[in-house]
Amino acid sequence: MSYAHVLEFIASEQESADERRRPPASLSIDSRDHAVEFLAALPAADPAAMLLAKSPLLGRLADFVWSQRKILRAYCLEIIRDDSTEIGVMLGAIRILIFLGEPTISAICEPLSNRQDAVGKIATMVPVMLPTLCDLSHYERKFLTPILSRRIVRLH
């Protein structure tokens, strides 16, 4: 059974108030390859919508992700640290770690925030989505100090 087909089916069905479609019980993540396939098959989420919701917007897949949290956490951490990871897989891994509230997500995403692609954009959003897991003074120095310095120079 392909993750892409299962996730597409689950995401495409209208959710009623009384019923939620869940991935089949036979669907599980039991290898790095399965994790990569799952992450690649995650439905895309608009970064602006994620930012407004302060959520990775996993929708109906949240229950499945939570049921697989231990193994997904381990594989997502491994996948994010691998520079050869495809962008879609990397985005999925970051979204999963945000959902799980991974304590090291800010430190992991800091170097990724310099990228000029979708990974860099979502990595930059991590402190906003998980402010309690970030060293705010670090971000104040990084973003506010240059802005204030330019303003002070303009005033003189």
Image: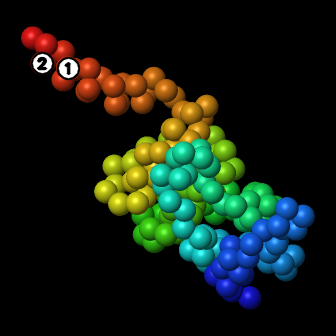
Q: Residue at x 66, y 45 (%)?
A: 101
Residue contact at pointers 1 and 2, CB within 8 angstroms: yes
Residue pushed farthest left?
156
Local packing at callout 1 (Cα closer than 10 Å; few below 14, some 14-19, many 20+) is few
Q: Label 2 is placed on what type of residue? A: Arg
User: How many numbered circles does the render carry?
Assistant: 2
In-front residue for pair 124/59: 59
Compared across the picture, whether 148 is left or right of 120 comes to: left
Expressed as whole percent of the image width and height from the top left, the position of residue 72 reads 69, 62
Compared across the picture, whether 27 is left or right of 12 comes to: right
Up the image or down, 128 lies above or below 77; here it is above
Q: Which quadrant, please, contains the C terminus?
A: top left
Whether residue 68 appears in this view of the structure is no
Q: Residue at x 56, y 74 (%)?
A: 40
Q: Residue at x 53, y 53 (%)?
A: 49
Expressed as whole percent of the image width and height from the top left, the position of residue 139 reads 42, 30
Expressed as whole percent of the image width and height from the top left, the position of residue 115 reads 34, 55
Q: Residue at x 79, y 61 (%)?
A: 63
Q: Secondary structure at mark 2?
A: helix
Expressed as whole percent of the image width and height from the top left, the position of residue 74 reads 67, 58
Q: Secondary structure at mark 1?
A: helix
List the residue tagged with mark 1: 151
Q: Which quadrant, please, contains the N terminus?
A: bottom right
- Where on the picture, by quarter, is residue 117? bottom left
Whether residue 14 appears in this view of the structure is yes
List the residue tagged with mark 2: 154
Residue pushed farthest top?
156
Q: Label 1 is placed on what type of residue? A: Arg
Residue pushed farthest bottom?
1
